[in-house]
Amino acid sequence: SAVLIQHAALLKLYYAAQDAYVAAPFAGKLVVLSSGEWALPHGVRERLPSQSQVEIVDIPGYHLDMFEGPQLVALMDQIEGLMAQVDMQIASDSTAAIAG
C-alpha cells in the first residue's frame, strides 16, 4: 500500500542519515520530539541535569503516524515554536555582536 511505501522510504532515509552521522561536540540545545508510542524510559527526564541542553517535547500519537492528521498539526506547531525561538536567539546574538 502507499502507506507502507512511505514508511519504507522514511526508514531508508533514517538509515542513510544514521550511516552518515559523525559524532562531534555540539554546543547547542538538543530537542527530542517523542511520540507516545516511543516514550522515553521512565526516569530519563528526571535524570537530566537542571541546566540540561536537552528539551523533550511530547507529540501525541504513534511514531509511524506522526506525519498524518492531527499528529502532523501538533508536530508542525512544535517545530514552528522551536524555529521562532531560534530566530529570536539569532536576532539577540546579532544585536549583541553589533553592540560590541
Image (tube, grey):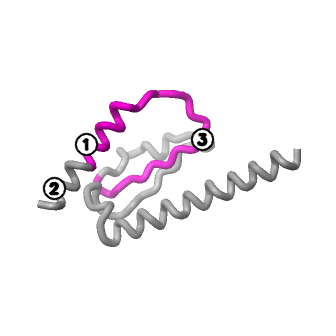
Q: Where does residue 12 sit, x and y in percent of width and height?
A: 25, 42
Q: Earlier in the sequence, mark 2 or mark 1?
A: 2
Of all residues, the one furthest to the left in this rendering is 1
Q: Which residue is mark 1?
A: 12
Residue at 56 percent of width and 34 percent of height: 26
* In-image side of 17 versus 53 (left or right): left
Residue at 62 percent of width and 42 percent of height: 51
* In-image side of 32 versus 62 (left or right): right
Residue 4, label in figure: 2
For label 3, the SS is loop
Q: Where does residue 30 sit, x and y in percent of width and height?
A: 52, 44
Crowding at label 3, few (<14), some or many (≥20) Cα neighbours within 10 Å? few
Q: Where does residue 98 sit, x and y in percent of width and height?
A: 84, 48
- Image quarter where the N terminus lies is bottom left
Q: Reply above or below: 22 against 88.
A: above
- Residue flagged by tag 3: what amino acid is it? Gly
Q: Which residue is mark 3?
A: 28
Crowding at label 1, few (<14), some or many (≥20) Cα neighbours within 10 Å? few
- Image quarter where the C terminus lies is top right
Residue at 32 percent of width and 60 percent of height: 66
Q: Earlier in the sequence, mark 2 or mark 3?
A: 2
- Give the quarter of the image for residue 44: top left
Residue 20, label in figure: none
- Residue flagged by tag 2: what amino acid is it? Leu
Q: Is residue 35 magenta?
A: yes
- Residue flagged by tag 1: what amino acid is it? Lys
Give the magenta part as a residue range: 10-37
Give how far apart the Cα atoms at labels 2 and 3 are.
Answer: 35 Å
Give how far apart the Cα atoms at labels 2 and 1 are.
Answer: 12 Å
